[in-house]
Amino acid sequence: MQGDFRRILSQANPSNGAAALDAIEDGLSALTNSRPAVAAQHLATLAFRFKGENRLDLAARAYDLAARVTPAPAAAYRLAAIRTRILDLCRRKTFDPVEGLLQELREAKAVAGDHRQNDPSLIHIAWDYELAGDAEGAVRSYLLARIARDQLGGQALTIDGDTLERKIRNLRILQMKALAEAGRHEEAQTLHERTRHILGLGPLQIYDIVSARQAAAGGQGEYRELLGARRIAEPEITFLEGPVALTSACGSLDAPPQYIARFKDCLTFPRSNLVLQGKRLVYDLAAHPLSGIADIKDGVNPDQIMTAVYGSKRALVEEPAETRTLDAGLMMFGLQSKNYGHWLLEFVPRMLWFNDSACPADFPICIDDHMPETHQQIVELLDERDRPILPMSAQATRFRELGIAPVPTFFPFDSRPGMPVYDAIWPMDVLGAVRRAVLDRLTARGIDLRPTGRKIVLSRRGFVQRQLLNEAEIIDALTRQGFEVVYPERLSFAEQVALYHTADMIVGSASSALTNCIFCNPQARVIALIHENRSFNFRGYTSMIESSGARLVFIRGATVAGEAVHHFHANYRVPVAQVFQAINRIHLL
């Protein structure tokens, strides 16, 4: 048999490998009686060769035969066979048997006393599937990686630093979104059902997407329009360098109507904009004719307390396991409410309509409880009814009656991948009304808002994204020219408004802090510093800031490559000379 064994080994190749192993297995008893250790070594060498030829099924079988030939190192060969078979099955997308093999692997490691991390990296296998665009292969591999993590002490985080659970959820959302967009909502529901128990999620229900106006027209609520739809103008953008060909898409010039609406028996999710009533999802953005360009983040962002996907005018939203119930409330909570720029532009204008006589005076104002104190200060300042303010924790909440008001314009959180950035234009009339209301309330409190001719430079030193890397150099040069350094986040809301309104010139990064320029006096001049990305929200910032009557000039600095971040948040540098050039020119506007 030894001669036949050597011949079989020497002649084995990818085309006849299975037959060679069949022949060896038929004569296995003879091998165990004649130099079994040598035979096992030869079989292990053959297995190694098969692995190099990417014939993992044959390699696993060769390792198994080696383990059967000799009892001495059999445990090590058995381990190698299991590991190779796991790798082979995962690459073949035959995932079902692997869970049992992981248990066998655990037992085999204990027998062999093997504590090394030579097990197949299921996380790397999943990552390969993910990079190849195979979401289902990635999900199945990540699910197996969870078992390996819990039973074998395997890797806990994915290649890009996510937990396995977060990764599985995100991939499932991608899969379900594709199905929903194709109108296959029931299939998406079934797909979620396969993994929701593992992730601790509830079942998904299907809802028809409607606007507040459509929902009320169906007889399930009250809707009162306070400012009709109207056409607005595209702003003229001024760059220090001259005209720039932008790559973003101009936002709609059709400003939506502003209203107050009331609905009974609504389910809501703090930190999200979703309102569920019966089998309908009331959400203006998702129901808008342009919603196809929007990357809707409700139910997707890490701080969301439910899962949701959208497509074909319907949505799938996770049914909460527990809810609390409130009698009534006004909805001032929602996606990104803790971000000052989003808060001031998307949420604060709603107070105009909540102050209208059409809105009940006894409804509390409901806000997210994770917002900075300044956010609540704005609500307290603008509320004319002395309503209670109710911070909402992250728990699904059912309202017996809910009052809602709209965002001033169609404003997606982000554009969908592959589409140009949507550069929303903010209606001057609505922001102007907010400005007047804030200034009037502060004046009534005795705050002096007379212009003082101050010149201020806004610092962004405390932020880790969209950093002006040579900020210290610019601040040093400007303070020698009479500018004051301001850290807006250290001031109360009233102090911020007074500061911006009394200043004649403001220099700062195009960020949330610059949003306060809606409170500038009409003679003010604003210099916005930003990176060179031509898809940035230049129209949005211009329409927002110039709603005050102030004039704005952008300086596009040089983007500095760094960590992988959203292109809007890249770091950059601006030459000091360009800042002084803008200061000298802006007076001519």
Image: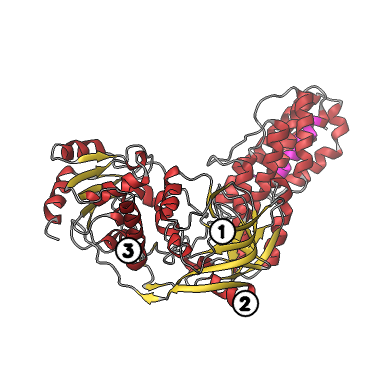
Q: Residue placed at 76% from the left, 24% from the top?
A: 112
Q: Quadrant of the N terminus?
A: top right
Task: Identify the residue position indicated by label 2 in the image.
Answer: 218
Q: Secondary structure at mark 1?
A: loop
> Which one is in front, 155 or 469?
469
Look at the magenta stretch and give its main secondary structure: helix
* Number of other residues with Cα within 10 Å of mark 3, as a class: few under 14, some 14 to 19, many 20 or more: some
Q: Label 1: how many residues lie within 10 Å, few (<14), some (14-19) or many (20+)?
A: many
Mark 2 crowdedness (10 Å alpha carbons): few <14, some 14-19, many ≥20: few
Residue 521, percent across and down? Answer: 23, 56
Residue 399 point in image, percent of width and height: 64, 59
Mark 3 lies on a secondary structure that is helix
CA gap, disc 3 to disc 1?
26 Å
Residue under label 3? 432
Residue shown at 45% from the left, 52% from the top: 379
Query: Where is residue 107, by image quadrant?
Result: top right
